[in-house]
Image (cartoon, helix red, strand yellow):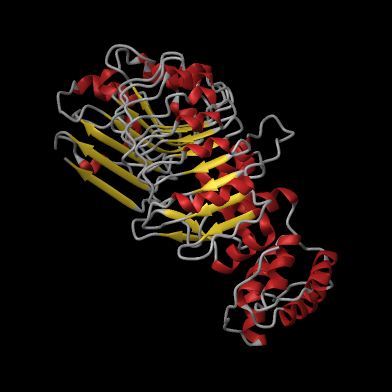
Amino acid sequence: MGAFPKVRLHKLSNEDGWSLFSRYAFQSGSSIGADSQLVKIGQKIVEKCDGLPLAIKILASLLRSKSERRHWEKVLDSSMWDLPGGNNDILPALSLSYCLLPSCLKRCFTYCAVFPKGYQFEKEKLVLLWMAAGFLDSPNNNNIVLEDVGNECFGELLSRSFFDEVTSVYRNQYYVIHDLIHDLAKFVSGDFCAHLEKNKPLKIAEGARHISYHMDDCDDFDRFEALSKSKSALRVLSLARYMITELPTAIGDLKQLRYLDVSLTNIIVLPESIYSLCNLQTLMLGGCERLQKGPTAIGDLKELRYLDVSKTKIKGLPESICTLCNLQTLSLRKCVGVQKLPDDMWKLRSLRCLAIDGSNVEQMPERLSILEKLHSMDMFVVGRVDGLPLAGLRGLPNIGGKLLIKGLENVANVGDAIEVDLKERGNLDDLTFEFDPSGTNNSEKERDVLENLRPHANLKKLTVSYYGATSFPSWLVDHSFRSMMSLHLIIAYFAIPCRHLGKFHHWKSSELRQ
């Protein structure tokens, strides 16, 4: 086990502590009308929390879904309260909250120790990483997908206050872990997890499996010499933001490595030895803005499940990537040098997430619709001549979340828009339709295409870019989109009378501009 740092905590009075507990433990947010026995047990739990707000909040959140007294008594009578807290009085309560988690949630939570304090988590990305690490139990019901299992696990941890939700000034949503909760993750991971800190002695337990180092201003390979002690055990190596320009050749000796994160570093090229990491499941290169050459022998990493090369200067991926039968996630976001995807991507039968928004991909591979497990694809491009036509989206019925359909001016047959049948895609909540930004539009054709791309009534956000017709499609001016929260229209002409827009009852933002 690790050790908690000494932290001074502001303590609440018994009255304020009970008020906080009631807010999170009872469905109504108040103890009024609650089971009197639960109230008595809860008050005793608050007393044991000794006025520590984080402990009160987490244990109350844990009990919120428990209506039977035995669950509350289990918390009250737990021997974990007698655990020595050392320099930190909150340790027993936090450890208790962890011990009461189901095994799947324990794995997912402990995994978060790999990330630094203050890290901004994206739920979708974290779920994909849990999947790649094999932490999610396969559902017994064939109608439930792993992403849903992951989302449920995340929701459970969020409801138990292991995560806090934050909305930035730009309305971007992300999640953070309280510093003390992060300390708990490191504590329960014990010697298996080591964090290398700047200007501090390098101490790595012989059995360490997770090693992370974040943000430094030097390129010092001497610090990696200690890794040799962990060759047989090391599973996770995170060097995100570490100011290195290359990886040591010796990295190929870490044969048991499952996870390698060198995102946001200054790496220019990957060493050939990296392709000998036969057990590697996750490779994160996102934000390596000096990386110009993609992973050349990527096909040798047969166990790879998650590959992120977003925001790099690579020009494309080798065809050998199509031999990775275990690959679940591929991210090429904002790779402006990428214009073409490998032709044989249809062979990636395990692929569940394809992220290419912000790249300059000109068309989709012809047989992409064979990938029946694909659940997330943020951009679909209709090519000028070749590639998968718009109608090919019909073969990908599980695509959900956010989708940009680009190049709609290239639709050869208006009937393709009908075949896509977007009105039945209730799993899509954010849609963007994009036409030719140069303005060389066919007004009548564009209206017909958009008319037949009527989305599902539950759509929450819609953007139409560079629309050149002189009237809106009928579905946009009716009143059927009750869940619409955001509408953005970028039109080529001012000929459309705005008064014809439907009255969207749940708009949070709207924009109409040329």
The number of discs equals 0
- Position of 504 compared to 58: left or right? left
- Position of 301 compared to 469: left or right? right
399 and 215: which one is in front?
Answer: 215
Tell me where residue 390 appears, x and y as whole percent: 38, 19
249 and 361: which one is in front?
Answer: 249
Tell me where residue 161 appears, x and y as whole percent: 61, 63
The relative height of residue 227 versus residue 294 in the rendered view (above or below) is below
410 and 473: which one is in front?
Answer: 410
Tell me where residue 329 appears, x and y as whole percent: 51, 33
The relative height of residue 510 versus residue 320 in the rendered view (above or below) is below
237 and 476: which one is in front?
Answer: 237
**Residue 419 in view (yes/no):** no
**Residue 244 in view (yes/no):** yes
Image quarter (top left, top right, bottom left or bottom right) of the C terminus: top left
Image quarter (top left, top right, bottom left or bottom right) of the N terminus: bottom right
- Position of 449 compared to 371: left or right? left
Tell me the residue at 19%/20% (across/down). 442
- Position of 252 compared to 206: left or right? left
The relative height of residue 372 versus residue 228 in the rendered view (above or below) is above
Tell me the residue at 68%/51% (across/down). 207
The relative height of residue 355 versus residue 419 in the rendered view (above or below) is below
Tell me the residue at 61%/35% (across/down). 255
Query: To which quarter of the image does residue 406 belong?
Result: top left
Tell me where residue 110 appears, x and y as whole percent: 64, 54
